[in-house]
Amino acid sequence: MEWLSLENVIAIGTSVLGLLVPIAMFLYDRRVPRRKLIGYRVQMDSPIGDGSSNPRLGDFDVPNMADASLVLLRIENDGSQSVADNDYTSSEVHGLTAEFTGRTVQAVSVTQPSGIEHLNSHFTNANGFEHIGSTVTIPRVPLNPGDHFKLLVLLSGGPAEGEVKLIGGLRDGRVHRNSAPTPDEKLRTFSLPARLLSGALALAVLALAGIIVLRVGNPIECEQGTLTLTGSTAFEPVARTLARQYESKCQGADISVEARGSEDGVAELAELGERSPDAAGSVIAFSDGPMGRRWNLTGKEVALSFFTLVVHKDVDLGPHGLSLQEVRDIYAGRYQRWGQVVPGQKEIADLPIVLVSRGDESGTRQIFQDRVLKGWEKAPSTSLDCTPPVRAADTVTRCELGSTRAVLNKVEEQPGAIGYSEVGLAKERGGKVRVVPLAGDWPDERQIDLGAGHYPYKDIEYAYTHGPAPAGSLAAGFLAYLDESVSQNVIRGKGHLPCLREPEQCRWVPTPAEGTAGPRRAADSPPKG
């Protein structure tokens, strides 16, 4: 598969990873580690009593202090979220309990770093700060990330270095013991999972950047010179976008776009090739359908293009749209007003039908005649400006315009108008025009991915040159650029199905039931001149 290149795989992987990392971090932060975290560590547990097992090392001659000891207990917010007073889950007035197994608490003192002296106000009897037996009850002290306080506890009745526990719980969190007596005063910014995932993302980005750097010297086969892209007005948005991209990548390339209709573009290329083959080497003509075969031009299948009928926004034909027979009757001039096509809609009952068509040089029109009408547009051209007569007439109003954009503009502004367009250009108009289903079949994105199923209004887009494009020419370089993944994405984004990605779809041919409309204009004779 062409798109399965190393660069594309890494690019897709990087994009997916870039999406998953913040989601994973969000979920991890909120669900996995319990965001609120209070840690405690015993920073000192030293004997000071007069017993034989705890020799006196200082002047602590206090009564009833056999086996006395001092413990310095640090309590800290280890998490990334603040702990509020209502985050403690204790059913008592206090929040935590420090337990010194096998020893009796004689006295306790509280210290905290400068800058957070306000913590002292919480250590009152009313808030549950007291010691009983072997325990010290600690108030519900609010702690911001990195905040801490210390308890200096005087104990007796047991050996030093006994068991010390901090008991309690936190809503959406937990209390845990830190093994090291000396804390890291620098607040940890990232957890281990965050560091691992962020590192993986960084490596993927570096790998992608490395591939891009290695390829940047010659991303495509850049050629210099001048080139003219002509032909299909329906394919013009793709041609113009790719021309600008190629010029931006390749200095010295000058590409102009002169869309004037598929048949005119192909015919002019053939005429130029007869007069000046060298000059014809700098022209590529895009064609809706295989028009270049009659002049023995060299064609490249570029995309499967999709077209659609469009009507003025006030003409609501419902989800089923028009049947193929109704379309044929409309373009044969058998209906003059929309009420004859969709009876029962009072709003459009007397609205004149205005057929906004293309000239017979248009590939979009040729495909419409071949695939939908199964014949020529039979209604004659009766108007230059697509304006219906003030009074009712026995003939339908029909006009011919020179480009797809002109058709869309006229359908958008003229009540009762119906025309045809390439799908991508029609959808760009949003709600200003209505896309018409054919027998309930829509040319939507899902249908395009499937080759539009049985949707009839479609054909292959060709890029024609006068003979094979010479090696090293700008025409050859641009044709090669059409096969690049970035170009394929542009083609797909404009509503066409790239042939390089979907070769089976581009081998699509009409079934015997579809038939053809007969010879196209000038099909039996070479171009004039």
Image (tube, rainbow, N blue to C red):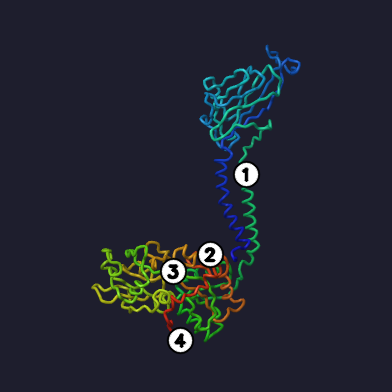
Q: Circle 3 is placed at which residue position?
A: 455
Crowding at label 1, few (<14), some or many (≥20) Cα neighbours within 10 Å?
A: few
* First in residue order: circle 3 vs circle 4: 3
Quick check: 94 left or right of 340? right
* Mark in front: 3 vs 2: 3
- The amino acid at mark 4 is Asp
Label 1, label 2: how far apart the Cα atoms are: 36 Å
- The amino acid at mark 2 is Asn
* First in residue order: circle 3 vs circle 1: 1
* Mark in front: 3 vs 1: 3
* Mark in front: 4 vs 1: 4
Label 3, label 1: how far apart the Cα atoms are: 51 Å
Q: Is residue 131 above or below residue 216?
A: above
Q: What element carries label 4?
A: loop
Residue 489's label in the rendered image is 2
- The amino acid at mark 3 is Tyr
Q: Circle 4 is placed at which residue position?
A: 524
Q: Where does residue 369 sit, x and y in percent of width and height?
A: 40, 76
Q: Is residue 264 above or below residue 315?
A: below
* First in residue order: circle 1 vs circle 2: 1
Label 3, label 4: how far apart the Cα atoms are: 29 Å
Label 2, label 4: how far apart the Cα atoms are: 38 Å
In the rendered image, the residue lying farthest to the top is 63
- Locate residue 247: give its quadrant: bottom right
Asked whether residue 433 appears in the rendered view, the answer is: no
Q: Circle 1 is placed at which residue position?
A: 193
